[in-house]
Image (cartoon, coloured by chain):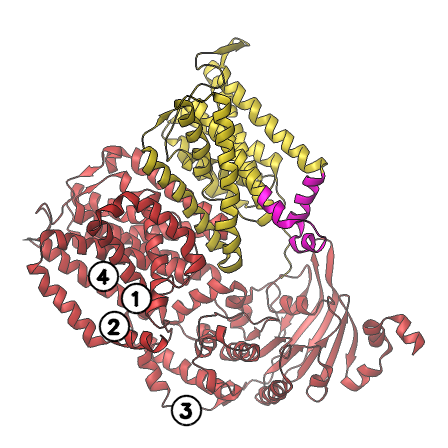
Chain colours: A yellow, B red
Amino acid sequence: MDFFVSLVIAGACVGSVYALVAVGLNMTFWTTKTLNFGQGAVMMLSAMSTALLVQYGLSDVVSIVFGLLLVALTGVLVERIAIRPALKTAGSMGWVIATLGFGIVIQGVTARYFGSQAVAFPEVLFQVQDVVTIWGQSISLQYLAVLCISLVLIIVLECLTRFTVLGTAIQACAQDMELAVVQGLPVNLIISGSFVLSSLLAGVAGILVAQISGTVDPAFGFELVMFGFVAAVLGGMGNSGGALLGGIILGITSKLVGGYISTAAEHGIAFGLLILMLAIRPQGFFGRAEVNKA
Amino acid sequence: MNTLREKLTTLLTNKYLQIFFLLTLLVGAGYMKAGTLQILSFALISILFTQSIYILTGMTGQISLGHAAFFGVGAYGTAILSKTLGLSLLFSIPIAGIAASLVAFILSYPAGRVKEVYLAMMTLGFGQIFLEVARELTALTGGVMGLSGVPSAGLGTLIVLGMKLSTVDYFQFLLLITACSVIFVRNFSQSRLGRSLFLVHYSELAAGSVGIVRRQTKQLAYALSGLFAGFAGAFYAHLVGYLGPDSFTISRSIEVLVIAIVGGLWSIGGQILSAIFFTFLPEQLQVFTQYQFIAYGLILTFTLILFRRGIGGLLFSASRFIRTSIRKVSDKNKISSDFLSIKANHTNILVKDITMKFGGLVAVNHVSLDIPARQITALVGPNGSGKSTLVNVIAGVFPPTAGRVLLNDSDVTSRSDAQMAKLGVIRTFQDPRLVPHFTVRENILLGAHAQMSYSWLEAGLGLPRAYKQELLALEQCDSIIELLDIAEVADQPVESLPYGYRRMTELGRALMARPRVILLDEPAAGLSDLEMQSLGVILKKLKSLGITILLIEHHMDFLADLVDEVVVLDSGSIIFRGTMLAMREDAAVIEAYLGTEGVEHA
C-alpha cells in the first residue's frame, strides 16, 4: 500500500511538470495553431545554462533568472525564424520541420561547445534527502515543491487568460485571427508573447525536472516534450484544465506501470497512450469535436 | 537556366547513359578500395531509404518523424531470421521488408485518422515505442548490448546458395536492387495510384470527388513506404553485421528527412544526389562530423522555407507523372469526345426532404428537389442560402441530418463521396482543387482513377495491363482537352496558369471521371466574358451527350439562355422553381435578393 501511495505521489509530482509543458504548448496553439517541436531543447537550454552558471560561481537565483531570460529570447527567435515564414510559405509541414530543426540546432550547439556529458544540477529547492512525513508516508520535499510550483503557475496562468485584458486578447486571437487584426489588436505582439510565455513555462519545467533528476545533458528535453505532447493531447489541445489532468494521469499511470510491471514499459506506455488517444479521440478527454462546414 | 536544366535532365534520364553508368559501377566495384565500396554501399542504402520518404511525405504529404522504426523492423527482422533461424538472405530480406510494410500498414490505421501536428506527434511517438521495444526485448534484439554476428559480407559470413558473398558481390547485388527500386518508384509515380497519392496530398475532398478512396490510398502509401524502409534496413543489417538500438533513434529519422528535403521532396533524382552527398560528406570532410547535428538542424529550419524544391528543383526540370512512352503513342491517336455520351435514358437525382444541420446552424431545411435527366438545372440564391451544402450532401461529402437522396430511384443517402463518384455523380468545387505542380493533362487524368483498375505492382513493374489502361485514358484525356479547347496549355503546370484555365482543368477532371450527373459549383465565377461563352457552349454539348447537369451560379445572364429550369434557395429552403423568365418576376425571389423594403419602394 505504501508503495502504491508513494508511486501515486511521485507520479502526480512528475505529471504536474508534464502539465506545465503541455500548458506551454497550448499557449502557442491558441494563437497560431502551431507548436514548437523543438520545445525539448528549450527546456534543456534553461536547465543547462542554470547549471553551468552556478558552476561558474553565480548565485542560484541569478543563474535561474538568466536561464529563463535566455529561453524567453529563444521563444521570440523560434517564432520569427521557424514559425512566421513557414506559415506564409510552406504550410504545416514547414513549421513542424522548421521548429524541429531549430531545436536540433540548439541541442547541437550546446553539445558542441559544452560537451555532451551530463552536468550536475545544483540543489536549488531543498536537498535530495529532505523529506516530510504525511500520514506515515515520507515524501521528498523536492517533489512536493515541484508539484506546488507547477500547480501555482498553471492556476495563475489560467486566471490571467480568464480575467485580464491580455488573456481576452489571446482568446480573441485564438477564436479568429483575422477579426483580431481588424479589431486593431497588436496581433504580432500577442503571438510573440505567446511564444515567450510558452518558452518560459518550458524553461521552468526544465529546471524543475533537472532538480529532480539531478543532472542535465544536451538530449535532456526530448522525451520530456513528448510527455508534454501526451499530456496536452490527453486533455485536448488548447485546454488548460485538461492539460493539468492529462499530465497528472500520465505521470501516475507511467509510475504505476513502472512500479508494478516494468520500468522499461514506463515510457512506452506514454507513447502508446498518445497514439491510442489520437486515433480514438483526437480532441482529448475534455475537448469538444470541432464542427466543420466545408 | 531552364534550358540548362532541361539539357541536364535529358542527359541524366537517357536510358543508355544510365545503363552505361550502372555497368561501369558494377564492373568497377571489383577494382575499388574496400573503404570506397563501403561508403558507396551506405549511399545505396540511403537511396533506398529515401525512396520511402518520397512515397510517404513527398507524394502523399504525410509527415513522418519515426521512419527509423520501419528501417529498424527491416534490420532486426532479417538479422534475427538469418542469425537465429539460419535463413538465407534471399528469404530473410524479403520477409523483413514485408514485415516492415505490415507494421507501416497497421500504423496507417491510427495515422489515417489524424493530420499535420497530430500526425507528427504520432509518428514521433511511434518511433520511440519501437526504440523501447528494441531496447527491452533482449531475447530477440540483444537489448542495449545489441545484436552482433549478423551474417555480413564484411565478416565473410554471408552465404547465399552455398556461395560466400564478398563485399564486392554484396555491393553489386545492392546496386541492382537499388536501381530496380528507383525504376519501380518512378513507374509507380507515373501511374494512376501514384497520381492519386498526390491528389490526396493536396485535397482529400477532390480525391473523393473522382472516386479515390482516401483511406485505401493512404494505407497503400504507408505500406509501400514501409516496404522500402524495411528493405533499406535489411540491407543495412547485412552490411554492418551489428545492430544496436542506437542506430534506430530519432537521429536516423531526421537524417533521412534531411536527405529527402535537401534533395527536394518531389524529386527522385534530387534525392539520389542528396543521399550520395550526405553519405560522402562526413567521410570526406572530417570537420563536418563535429557540426553534423547543427548542420542538420539548420537545414531543417531553413530548407522548406527558402529552398522548397531542393537540389532536384535546382538541377532538374520538374518530374512528370505520365509515362513518356505512352504519351508518344497516345499523341498519334485521336478519338472523339462522344465517348462521354450516356446511353441509358435515366439518370436523375431525387432529393427528398433533406435537412442538414451543423451544430445549431440549419444550412438546408427540408429541401425536396428533382434534378431531371438530360437537363441543365440551375441552383441560385443569395450567399449562405445552402446551395453548396446541398451539393455537398448530394455528392456524399456530408451525410444529411435527415432526408434521402435517390439516384435512378435507388437510395444513395449517406454513401461516401468516392462511392457517389463511382456511381457517376461527379462534382467540381467553388475554388478549383488541383495538384498545383501537375500539368493540365496530369490533373485531368486524375479523373480516370476509378475507371482504371491495375494494381500498384502492375504500375511499378510497368506491366501491359497498366500500359493499355493508361493509353486508353490518355486518349480520352486528349479528346477532353480538345473539347475544352485548352490544348495550348495542356502540358503546363496548373500553378503557372491563369484562373480560367484552372477552372477548365477541374471541369476536365470531372469529365474524365465519366459523369452521368455533374454538379458544378459556380463554374463561371472568375471567368472572362469570352471564357464564359465557351463554357456555355461546352455545357450545351455535355447536355446533348446526355449528361445531367446541376449548376450553382450567380451570373443570371450566363444562365439565361442555358438552363432548362432554375431553382431558388433562400435560408436553406426552396422558394421558387421554374423558368428563368418567371423567376425574374417572382415576388419571393425579388424579396430574397433585394429585401422587403426594396419591393415596397419599387
Q: What number is the disc on residue B573?
A: none
**For the residues marked 1 and 4, what is the alpha-carbon distance in whole angstroms?**
13 Å
Marks 4 and 3, the one that precedes in the sequence: 4
**For the residues marked 4 and 3, what is the alpha-carbon distance in whole angstroms?**
38 Å
Answer above or below: position of B197 versus B125.
Answer: below
- Residue B133 place in picture, x, y as percent: 33, 37
* Contact flag, marks 2 and 4 (Cβ < 8 Å): no
The amino acid pointed to by label 3 is Lys
Determine the secondary structure under disc 1: helix
* Contact flag, marks 4 and 3 (Cβ < 8 Å): no
Q: What number is the disc on residue B334?
A: 3
The amino acid pointed to by label 1 is Gly
Q: Chain of mark 4?
A: B
Answer above or below: position of B185 versus B139.
Answer: below
Q: Is residue B442 left or right of residue B267?
A: right
Was residue A135 drawn as part of the magenta stretch in this picture?
no
Marks 2 and 4, the one that precedes in the sequence: 2
Answer above or below: position of A113 versus B371.
Answer: above
- In the picture of the structure, the residue carrying the numbered disc 2 is B12
Which residues lie in the magenta part? A165-193
Q: Is residue B209 left or right of residue B153?
A: right
Q: Could you tell me if residue B236 is visible in this image?
A: yes
Marks 1 and 4, the one that precedes in the sequence: 4
- In the picture of the structure, the residue carrying the numbered disc 4 is B178
Q: Residue at x 70, y 58 (%)?
A: B357
- In the picture of the structure, the residue carrying the numbered disc 1 is B269
> Mark 1: few, some, or many residues within 10 Å (few <14, many ≥20)?
many
**For the residues marked 1 and 3, what is the alpha-carbon distance in whole angstroms?**
33 Å
A234 and B420: which one is in front? A234
* Contact flag, marks 1 and 4 (Cβ < 8 Å): no
B92 and B228: which one is in front? B228
A197 and B559: which one is in front? A197
